[in-house]
Image (cartoon, coloured by chain):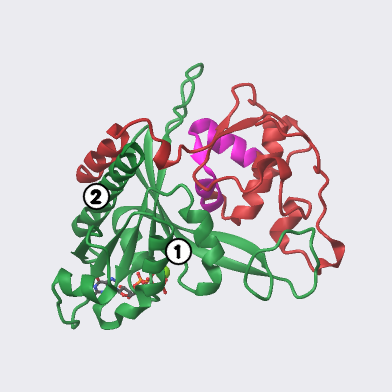
Amino acid sequence: MIFGRSERGKPPVEPVTLKILVAGGFGVGKTTLVGAVSEIKPLRTEEVLTEAGRPIDDTSGVEGKHTTTVAMDFGRITLREDLVLYLFGTPGQDRFWFLWDELATGSLGAVVLADTRRLEDCFAAVDYFERRSIPFVVGVNCFEGAARYPADDVRQALDLDPGVPVVLCDARDRETVKEVLIRVVQHAMAHAADRRQAVTT
Amino acid sequence: MSGDGQGKRHWFDDEAGPVVRPYAMTRGRTTSPAQHRLDLIAVVVTEPHAYDPEADQTLSPEHVDIVGLCRDAPQSVAELAAELDLPIGVVRVLIGDLVDEEMVHVTRPVPPAELPDESILRDVINGLRAL
Ligand SMILES: Nc1nc2c(ncn2[C@@H]2O[C@H](COP(=O)(O)OP(=O)(O)OP(=O)(O)O)[C@@H](O)[C@H]2O)c(=O)[nH]1
Ligand SMILES: [Mg+2]
C-alpha cells in the first residue's frame, strides 16, 4: 500500500468504507478468492473465550477462560481515493460465530462460496445470512474434477430463495471473482429497494 | 466521540494468568470503554495538530505508528491491525487512547442501509468493473 504524504494544510481524504464478507466451508477457496482481487493480509484477533466459545468481557469470572487467536483473510480494494471496499474472509468453524456477528454488522453483503462436491459445508453460512437478512450471493467455485452442475441444481440443493443469485466462478480468476462481487452489490441494491417498497406499501 | 477518560486504568485481572505479550502494550487492557468494539472499517484520522507524537512520553511506539500512518492517509481499524501486525483488540485499545488524547478521531462507517442514495453502490460496481 503506497500513499503519498498529504500536502500540508490539505486535509486528508476520509474514504467511505464498505465491507463484503466471504464465507463458506473449510478449504473452499475463501483465501484464494480474496487474494484474486485484492492485496491480501492476514488479520488477527485475540479473543478471551469461555468454554462455550463466546467472548466474555474481562470483568466477569476468570474460571475456564482462555485466549484464542483467530485469523481472518482481509483484503482492500481501492475503488477511488474516497471509496474503499474491504473483503473479510470469515473463519469457518462454528465456534467463531461471534466473529461473524461483528463482521456481518453493517456489511453490504456476503459471498457464500460453495464446492459442489460437498455442498452441505455451506449450509450453515446460507442459514446465517438468511436469518439476518443480509443479502448474499452463492459463488460456486469450479474445481477441476468436480462435476459441473447447472446453477439451478445448486439453488435447489441449497433450497435458496428465488432472488438469491448463484454464480459459477473460479476463485483463482480475477475476472470471475469481480463478477461475483458485482453481483453481491447489485443484489444488495435490489434488496434495499425491496425494503423501501415494503416500508412504503 | 469524546472519551470520558473513565476506566483508563482498566487493568486486566491479575488472576487471568499470563498476559499475552501484545497486551503488555496496552497495559493489559483488553477493552477501552470509550471505544467499545470500534467497527473494523471505521476510519482513523490523525488530527492536524498531532504533528509530534514522539514528544509525548506517555505514548508507545505503536501509538506513534498509528498517528503517523493515519496522517499520511486515514486508515481503517482493520488495516492498522494488519499493517502493524497486531491483534484487532490491541489496536482498538491503542486507538481509544489516542482518541482520549485527541490525537486522532474516528469516523464510523455509514451502514449500507443508511446510505443516502444508490449512487455510491453504482460507483462500487463501476469501480469493480474497472479493476
Ligand atoms: N482448481 C481449483 N483450485 C482452487 C480453486 N480455489 C481454490 N483452489 C485451491 O484450493 C485450496 C484451498 O483454497 P483456499 O483459498 O486456501 O481455501 P479456504 O476456503 O481459504 O480454506 P480455509 O481457510 O482452510 O478454510 C488451495 O490449494 C487453492 O489453490 C479453484 O477455483 N479451482
Ligand atoms: Mg483460508
Chain that is red in the image = B
Q: Position of residue B15 (x, y in %)?
A: 86, 67
Chain that is green in the image = A
Whole-angstrom CA distance, mark 1 to mark 2, is 19 Å
- The residue identified by callout 2 is A182
> Does the magenta segment cover residue B73?
yes
> Mark 2 near ligand 1 (CB under 8 Å)?
no
> Mark 1 near ligand 1 (CB under 8 Å)?
no
The picture quadrant for ligand 2 comes to bottom left
Residue extending farthest front? A201
Q: Position of residue B80 (x, y in %)?
A: 54, 46
Please give left or right for residue B47 compared with residue A30 in the image: right
- The residue identified by callout 1 is A90
Label 2: chain letter = A
Q: Nearer the viewer, residue B9 or A5?
A: B9
> Does the magenta segment cover residue B70?
yes
The answer to whether B127 is drawn above or below residue B104 in the figure is below
Please give left or right for residue B89 compared with residue B126 in the image: right
Label 1: chain letter = A
Disc 2, SS: helix
Q: Name the residue type under label 2.
A: Ile
Q: Name the residue type under label 1.
A: Thr
Q: Nearer the viewer, residue B22 or A29?
A: A29
Q: Residues within 10 Å of mark 1 (few under 14, many from 20)?
A: many
Q: From which residue to which does the magenta span run?
A: B64-82
The residue positioned 79% from the left and 51% from the top of the image is: B27
Residue extending farthest right? B14
Q: Nearer the viewer, residue B53 or A101?
A: A101
What is the quadrant of residue B70 in the picture? Answer: top right
Q: Position of residue B21 (x, y in %)?
A: 72, 61
Disc 1, SS: loop
The residue positioned 22% from the left and 63% from the top of the image is: A166
